[in-house]
Image (spheres, rainbow, N blue to C red):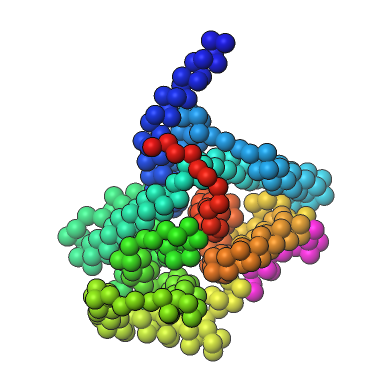
């Protein structure tokens, strides 16, 4: 009885400080999303932060996993365990240590994601989370602009400390066709990875079904940073996002002109004018090269990624973690985990399209932009997707 009483007192104490806990946890989550490319030892900063978040959820009495979620958890883990067992018996190229490492990673991400999802949903923290993510993204964008200016200043401004735990080589921010062009990458290891991160957030801002309104200047600022990455894939996804957003007649009818839009349009046009030669080389010329068959990057993303699928192990795959780095997540899963996992992911993609076609289309497209279903960035994206893809129906706990 005494232990139960102490447990209740501990829960009551944490309950009275739940607003503080939520601020800490959501800030940590938002920061972890921005630090997916920072490495310390064999783990990313994101993985360390997610571990801290999991501990915070437990000690504050806010970790929860529901019976239905536990069934999905066990199904996913079961598929991976069977995959490891069968490959260990029948696949001479399979490395057991690599398979077990993949299993541990997926289990860890699932445990943290389930806890965070329930925490956000139970306390109605969707708006607070999305705003926190945007604030951190704006800071990341400002850092990106500063680093870009610092690189152009030829050493007058310090910037190296931002890249202590990631790449520092010239190839990580230069563009081959244009001499002395600096592509904005901020705290990420590549401009395209920064673009991936920002397009996810822009998609959440515009396509969420929670009726959460993020200030337009934030979304437009993040849009500008995506353009400054000069990443072809990121800009292409960005254009798709805005096409999907404005393509419906309802959006056109609801649109109301505000005077501040002149400022946004003026800034955008000025950036386009100043960068017209760069945009021609990085976007227009590259599009022409892709159409003419001179640029093979799109071919590798969409078609060549499937070359790693082993026909001899099509049903069970090569084993989790056994495919080299490729851009296409669907090909990644078919190659690693086989036909059953591939079908489940395809059905999940279809489910997303049916309940929120805008987010569903974006999810499918982004799965061709950046591969790595075992990466922390993918799992945080998955968490945000599940939180914002549908409208709220449940009554939440009010801890205020």
Q: Which residue is drawn at 42% across and 85% down?
A: 284
Position of 132 relative to 267 (above/below):
above
Q: Which of 27 and 128 is in front in this view?
A: 128
Report whether residue 184 is seen: no
Residue 234 lies in quadrant: bottom left
Q: Which residue is drawn at 55% across and 16% down?
A: 4
Image coordinates for residue 373, horizontal then vertical, percent:
59, 55
Q: Which residue is drawn at 42% across and 62% down?
A: 205
Residue 265 on the magenta span = no
Position of 34 relative to 232 (above/below):
above
Considering the image in quadrants, where does the N terminus appear? top right
Position of 50 relative to 306 (above/below):
above
Q: Nearer the viewer, residue 187 or 22?
A: 22
| For residue 199, side relative to residue 87 (left or right) | left
Q: What stretch is highlighted in magenta?
A: 303-315
Residue 181 lies in quadrant: bottom left
Image coordinates for residue 368, horizontal then vertical, percent:
57, 68
Considering the image in quadrants, where does the C terminus appear? top left
Q: Main secondary structure of the magenta part?
A: helix
Q: Which residue is drawn at 72% across and 64% down?
A: 309
Residue 308 on the magenta span = yes
Q: How many labels does the image show?
A: 0
């Amino acid at each position: 009885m005494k232990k139960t009483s102490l447990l209740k007192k501990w829960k009551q104490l944490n309950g009275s400080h739940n607003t503080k806990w939520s601020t800490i946890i959501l800030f940590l989550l938002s920061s972890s999303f921005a630090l997916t490319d920072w490495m310390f030892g064999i783990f990313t900063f994101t993985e360390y932060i997610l571990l801290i978040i999991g501990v915070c959820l437990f000690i504050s009495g806010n970790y929860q996993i529901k019976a239905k979620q536990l069934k999905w958890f066990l199904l996913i883990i079961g598929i991976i365990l069977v995959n490891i067992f069968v490959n260990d018996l029948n696949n001479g190229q399979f490395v057991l240590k690599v398979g077990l490492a993949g299993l541990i990673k997926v289990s860890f991400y699932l445990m943290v994601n389930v806890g965070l999802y329930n925490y956000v949903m139970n306390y109605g923290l969707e708006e607070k989370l999305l705003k926190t993510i945007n604030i951190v993204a704006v800071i990341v964008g400002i850092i990106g602009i500063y680093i870009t200016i610092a690189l152009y200043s030829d050493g007058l401004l310090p910037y190296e400390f931002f890249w202590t735990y990631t790449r520092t080589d010239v190839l990580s921010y230069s563009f081959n066709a244009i001499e002395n062009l600096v592509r904005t990458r901020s705290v990420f290891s590549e401009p395209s990875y920064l673009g991936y991160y920002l397009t996810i957030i822009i998609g959440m801002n515009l396509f969420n079904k929670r009726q959460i309104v993020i200030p337009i200047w934030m979304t437009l600022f993040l849009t500008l940073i995506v353009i400054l990455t000069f990443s072809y894939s990121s800009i292409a996804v960005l254009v798709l996002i805005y096409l999907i957003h404005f393509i419906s007649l309802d959006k056109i009818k609801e649109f109301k002109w505000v005077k501040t839009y002149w400022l946004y349009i003026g800034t955008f046009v000025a950036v386009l004018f100043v960068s017209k030669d760069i945009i021609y080389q990085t976007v227009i010329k590259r599009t022409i090269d892709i159409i003419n068959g001179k640029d093979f990057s799109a071919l590798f993303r969409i078609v060549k990624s499937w070359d790693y699928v082993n026909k001899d192990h099509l049903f069970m795959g090569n084993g989790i973690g056994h495919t080299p780095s490729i851009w296409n997540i669907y090909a990644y899963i078919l190659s690693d985990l086989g036909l059953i996992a591939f079908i489940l992911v395809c059905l999940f993609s279809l489910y997303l399209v049916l309940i929120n076609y805008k987010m569903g289309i974006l999810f499918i497209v982004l799965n061709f932009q950046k591969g790595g279903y075992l990466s922390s960035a993918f799992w945080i994206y998955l968490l945000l997707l599940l939180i914002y893809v549908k409208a709220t129906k449940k009554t939440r706990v009010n801890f205020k």
